[in-house]
Image (cartoon, helix red, strand yellow):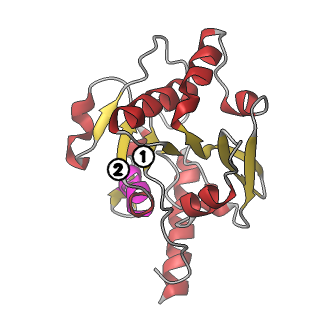
Amino acid sequence: MSGVPPRPPWHVLGAVLAGGLSSRMGREKALVQLEGAPLLRHVLDRFAPQVDAIVLNANGDPARFAAFGLEVVADGRPGAPGPLAGLLAAMEAARARGLGLVATVPSDAPLLPRDLVARLAAALGPADVASLAVSPGGLEPLFALWRADAAPAIAAALDRGERAPHRLVATLPHARVAFESEAAFLNVNTPEDLRRAAELMRVARAAEA
């Protein structure tokens, strides 16, 4: 696609994080229909071209995602400990494949930037553990690129009861990349968010026509 930086030369595992409880939506967010397709399909359409392989982090019966043809990796920790556990599971999957980087996005972000991974990779310095997106609304810790060998640090954080990626990353060397569009990082948490996402998608299609 014109204007989109080329995919990074490093081998990147993409991880779509769908391990949340979807309590505000009241149903599985990844499978909620938006403009004729599940939210997860919109995420994959934008994310898959940016990485070498994709896994889906989700708990419960993986059969509900069979139509997407993805490997589903569960948290591996009891009690729904949050996105850090999903990140650790993805890192373990990456290391098993011999991939050195893990790019993460949530399963409820249907407008995520098409150049997300390339820009995060370009900013990742030799000493950085991760590179994170920053939108006009602030830090977006689930839109990130991590070195897979940071798995021990993630495991140690989980062992101490940490659940929030932004708190952990504040203690580690990392890069931050500013993105201009706040809409690109819209998380569909509620029915109102779903209506907003549909409106934004229609506006984008009209602009491209």
> Which residue reaches farthest front?
126
Residue in view at x 42 percent, y 28 percent: 92
Secondary structure of residue under mark 2: strand
Q: Position of residue 22 (x, y in %)?
A: 49, 32
**Nearer to the camera, 29 or 54:** 54
Q: Where is residue 203 shown, x and y percent of the image?
A: 56, 77
Q: Residue at x 69, y 66 (%)?
A: 181
Crowd around label 2: few <14 · some 14–19 · many ≥20 (10 Å): some
Q: Separation of disc 1 and disc 2 at Cα?
A: 5 Å
Query: What residue is pinned by disc 2?
Result: 53
Residue extending furthest toward the bottom: 209
In magenta, the rendered stretch is 38-46
Q: Is residue 53 left or right of residue 176?
A: left
The label on residue 44 is none
What amino acid type is highlighted by mark number 1?
Leu
Q: Quadrant of residue 58?
A: top left
- Tell me the chief SS of the magenta region: helix
Q: Identify residue for label 1.
A: 13
Q: Earlier in the sequence, mark 1 or mark 2?
A: 1
